[in-house]
Image (cartoon, rainbow, N blue to C red):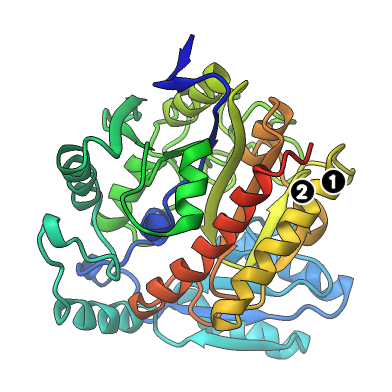
Amino acid sequence: MNFLGKSRSRTAALLPLCWLFLKILRPGHSHLYNNRYAGDKVIRLFPKTDGEAHALKKMFRQLQVDLWQPSSISHVSEGTVTDVHVLQNASQALLAFFHEANIQYEILIEDLQKALEKESILRTQRNRRSLSDYNYEVYHSLEEIQDWMHHLNKTYSGFIHLFSIGRSYEGRSLFILKALLTYRSDPVMKTMLNHLYFYIMPVFNVDGYHFSWTHDRFWRKTRSRNSRFHCRGVDANRNWKVKWCAEGASVHPCDDTYCGPFPESEPEVKAVANFLRKHRKHIRAYLSFHAYAQMLLYPYSYKYATIPNFSCVEYAAYKAVKALRSVHGAQYKYGPASRTLYVSSGNSMDWAYKNGIPYSFAFELRDTGHFGFLLPEMLIKPTCTETMLAVKNITMHLLKKCP
């Protein structure tokens, strides 16, 4: 019996494509969003005591700030670096509060609108090129990415297979690329593709990604509607059926970490979960890519516990981070997500591991906050180059039959 065109002795790996990861998470944009970010600031805080952390939480809830990191107000704690996007009309009061409370802070972005406009001006000077010469060093809209996927499928039908696993809440196709062969001379890639399939989903949250280009540059959630609240969307990485809606997730529909009305309520999550369930006996690894923090994480995220195959996974992470650092010197932390980053429930990494996929990783890519969610296009290539080397190291580790 064949599995997606190859014998059952072949295994599979599911990972988003490195060259597209930044486009998925935080797209660049030439629109100016009706000047909605004029005067907004991004501020980094360093709470030194529990008292300062508690005061920040209280103030953040009152002002309804946009927390960049950590992902939830509940994770603001003593010693935790905290980056927050503050609206213009709240920044003066907030800065006065920091001074009065003697809380150390640093302004990372003085005017968010100007930062966006600067990047927009630079972008107009770059050539986006045709589909046959797709530019991997600029951010692309959803339409451009999907056109490129169709072009690959048509032009390299012997190497690539494109298919859809379902539709989003707003009816957009959820496309996956299946890499069959490589025509390049890279011996490592040849070895990898002789033993593994790669299923690549460049854009998971297609509705949210599209919305971030047209309306809200920093939109994170899906775009589903809630019958009881005006707020839209669910955090797609809190909607999985693994310790759903526990610590690190919110029950409030207006929060960025809203877990949804029930597990797999989002059609995007449901579609990917169904795909993984269908093929989990053959899938060796699941990799997801996020921003930002420069970390390589593995389970568990929802609890402080050691996974059964810790030694194999930990060694793979160590080798991957070491390889990544060798390219441009980028320093990545690695370890169990709950201890390395924070506790969060209902995410895809834990779900994949709990459903029998032995290697499950989450990359938190560049940077550590200087640019945050506004990573310049000039950093796409170095970030992708180093990350791809890390992915190769993880993949080669899989082939060594470590449990």
Residue nearest the viewer, comparing 13 with 45: 13
Q: Are marks 1 and 2 in contact (CB under 8 Å)?
A: yes
The residue nearer to you, when weighing 44 against 14, is 14
Under mark 2, the amino acid is: Val
Coordinates of residue 237 in the picture (x, y in percent): 57, 41
Residue where numbered disc 2 is placed = 313
Q: Residue at x 87, y 73 (%)?
A: 51
Crowd band around label 1 with a 10 angstrom C-alpha radius: few (<14), some (14–19), many (20+): some
Q: Amino acid at mark 1?
A: Phe
Whole-percent x and y of residue 204? Answer: 41, 41
Residue at figure coordinates x 87%, y 37% from the top left: 308
Which secondary structure lies at badge 2? Answer: helix
Residue drawn at the location 69% of the way across and 30% of the way down: 244
162 relative to 85 in the view: left or right = left
Q: Is residue 121 left or right of residue 201?
A: left
198 versus 370 height, above or below: above
Task: Say what secondary structure mark 1 lies in.
Answer: helix
Does residue 379 appear in this view?
yes
Q: Which residue is mark 1?
A: 310
Q: Quadrant of the C terminus?
A: top right
Q: Residue at x 75, y 63 (%)?
A: 318
Q: Is residue 37 left or right of residue 228?
A: left
In the rendered view, would you say 376 is above or below 207? below
